[in-house]
Image (cartoon, rainbow, N blue to C red):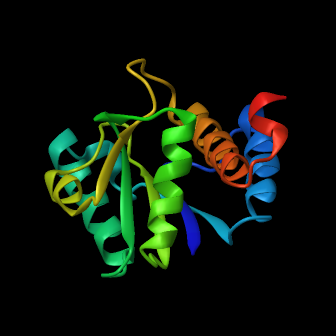
Amino acid sequence: MKLQFWTIGKSHEPYVKEGIELFTKRITNYYPVEWNIIAMPKNAGTLSETDLKKKEGEIVLNALQKEDYLVLLDERGKQLTSEGLAAFIQSRGNESVKNIVFLIGGAYGVSEVIIQRANYKWSLSSLVFPHQLVRLILAEQVYRACSINRNEKYHHS
């Protein structure tokens, strides 16, 4: 199974880049993993919120494969404990899912078509975080889940 982290926006800011790279490298001990930073449409500043979400949605849908398991990070999604995320990832592996795509939407969220396409909607917290910080939290929590599934000490160190 391969894990992909997709995010709409700019490249990683320096204040989170080192942490993202550290946890992403650690995840490679368990699964192949990659980041896909999807650039905002060139005319993003001239588009309405609805049109921007629609355009971003089209880009995401065109990049997704039919069999990709899409996990949308969404404030209205289901919250999981670290153990719950570990079980979720393990279950996808048991179902022979080939590719899990974790998607962090744009500044205004995602279009309805992406919400409908998502196989699972996951909320990191009831709090709102900057997109850059969400990237770091996502990478760390997925690494933590992998270490839980292997019964390694990171979760309780």
* Res. 37 visible in picture: no
Q: How many marks?
A: 0
Q: Is residue 132 left or right of residue 6?
A: right
Against 105, residue 1 (above or below) is below
Nearer to me, 90 or 67: 90
Q: Position of residue 91 (x, y in %)?
A: 46, 62
* 42 or 141, nearer to the observer: 141
Q: Nearer the viewer, residue 51 or 112?
A: 112
Residue 128, quarter of picture: top left
The image position of residue 49, as x and y in percent, is 21, 40
Quarter of the rendering occupied by the C terminus: top right
On the image, which quarter does residue 122 sit in? Answer: top left
Residue at 44 percent across and 35 percent down: it is 80
Q: Quadrant of the N terminus?
A: bottom right
- Name the residue: 65% across, 38% down: 136
Q: Residue furthest top?
A: 127
Residue 82 screen position, x and y as percent: 57, 36
Q: Residue furthest front?
A: 151
Instruction: Tell me, yes or no, if residue 105 can be seen here.
Output: yes
- Whether residue 133 sits left or right of residue 114 in the image: it is right
**Residue that appears at 82% across and 48% down:** 22
Q: Nearer the viewer, residue 42 or 148?
A: 148
Left or right: residue 113 compared with residue 125: left
Q: Residue at x 68, y 72 (%)?
A: 32
